[in-house]
Image (spheres, rainbow, N blue to C red):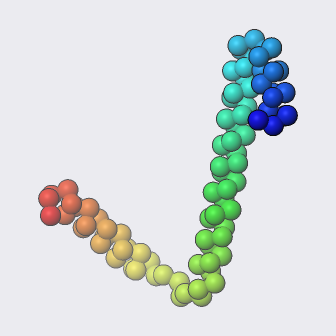
Amino acid sequence: MTAIESQLIERLKKLPPSRVAEVVDFVEFLASREERAAAARRLSEGLARLDALNLPPISEDEVADEVAAVRRERRQVRLGG
């Protein structure tokens, strides 16, 4: 355990339960903010890799065909094959 972790634990022990709950909420908020930032970075990197492929744009008809194909597959799965 690091020195800062020990200090935080000692300080937490001195807080009333309601304040500890606030600390927990704040830590969860910070963690979720980090998770969102990491997800945004991954998305940005993925979009950059996709852009680097220089693929032609997909037409609306191609998108509609893909959606229809997935819906057919799901329907077949639900109906048992």
* Furthest residue toward front: 1
**Nearer to us in this view, 15 or 65:** 15
Q: Where is residue 55 in the image (x, y as percent from the top left)?
A: 55, 87
Left or right relative to 28: residue 50: left
Q: In this view, does 18 lie above or below 5?
A: above
Q: In which quarter of the image is residue 68?
A: bottom left
Tell me the quadrant of the picture where the N terminus can be found.
Answer: top right
Q: In this view, does 72 lie above or below 9?
A: below
- What residue is rendered at 66% in x and 67% in y? 44
Q: In which quarter of the image is residue 75?
A: bottom left
- What residue is rendered at 62% in x and 64% in y? 43
Q: Quadrant of residue 3?
A: top right
Left or right relative to 72: residue 35: right
Number of numbered markers: 0
Tell me the quadrant of the picture where the C terminus can be found.
Answer: bottom left
Q: Position of residue 53 (x, y in %)?
A: 59, 86
**Nearer to us in this view, 66 or 20:** 20
- What residue is rendered at 66% in x and 70% in y? 45
**Nearer to us in this view, 19 or 69:** 19
Q: Position of residue 16 (x, y in %)?
A: 75, 11
Left or right relative to 66: residue 19: right
* Furthest residue toward top: 16
Q: Where is residue 59 in the image (x, y as percent from the top left)?
A: 46, 82
- What residue is rendered at 25% in x and 67% in y? 73
Q: Is residue 58 above or below residue 5?
A: below
